[in-house]
Image (spheres, rainbow, N blue to C red):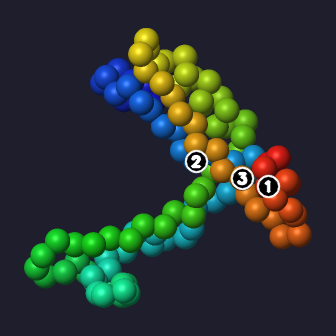
């Protein structure tokens, strides 16, 4: 984050954090797909011609709150005048919990 701030980027986004650790999906989490009408088929290789299409799914991972909070504080200290830091926060729905519990998360 500090490097981007020094390079002059004014709107910096720290994404995505949660109230608990959540790992990323297992590899591969980026794949080539063939463009088709209404569907996409996973392939192992990039297309021979044309523009490749990729699908990415990381699963919205998050480090533990004590880790990302420390990192966000450091990032906030490193941004300069006229720069803003956005922190993308995501609730984690749990089975059996209602919408209020998700908002509180």
| Mark 2 or mark 1, earlier in chain | 2
Q: Is residue 59 above or below residue 105?
A: below
Mark 1, Cα crowd under 10 Å, few <14 / some 14-19 / many 20+, is few
Circles 1 and 3 in contact, beta carbons < 8 Å = yes
Residue at the spot 65% in from the left edge and 29% down from the top edge: 70
Q: Is residue 14 above or below residue 43?
A: above
Residue at the spot 73% in from the left edge and 57% down from the top edge: 92
On the rendered structure, is 58 left or right of 8?
right
**Circle 3 is placed at which residue position?**
91
On the rendered structure, is 11 left or right of 23?
left
Q: Which residue lies furthest to the left in this view?
A: 49
- The tag on residue 102 is 1
The secondary structure type at the circle numbered 3 is loop
The secondary structure type at the circle numbered 2 is strand
Mark 2, Cα crowd under 10 Å, few <14 / some 14-19 / many 20+, is some
Mark 3, Cα crowd under 10 Å, few <14 / some 14-19 / many 20+, is some
Rendering quarter of residue 60: bottom right
Q: In this view, does 28 lie above or below 62?
A: below
Residue at the spot 38% in from the left edge and 71% down from the top edge: 55
Image x and y of residue 19, in percent: 75, 46
Q: Distance between the residues labelled 3 and 2?
A: 10 Å
Q: Distance between the residues labelled 2 and 1?
A: 16 Å
**Circle 2 is placed at which residue position?**
16
Q: Between residue 49 and residue 81, name the one nearer to us.
A: 81
């Amino acid at each position: 984050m500090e490097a981007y701030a020094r390079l002059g980027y004014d709107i910096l986004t720290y994404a995505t954090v949660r109230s608990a650790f959540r790992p990323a999906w297992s590899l591969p989490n980026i794949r080539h797909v063939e463009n088709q009408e209404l569907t996409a088929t996973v392939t192992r290789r990039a297309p021979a011609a044309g523009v490749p299409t990729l699908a990415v799914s990381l699963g919205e991972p998050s480090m533990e709150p004590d880790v990302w909070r420390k990192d966000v504080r450091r990032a906030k200290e490193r941004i300069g005048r006229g720069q803003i830091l956005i922190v993308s926060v995501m609730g984690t729905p749990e089975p059996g919990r209602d919408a209020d519990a998700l908002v509180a998360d």
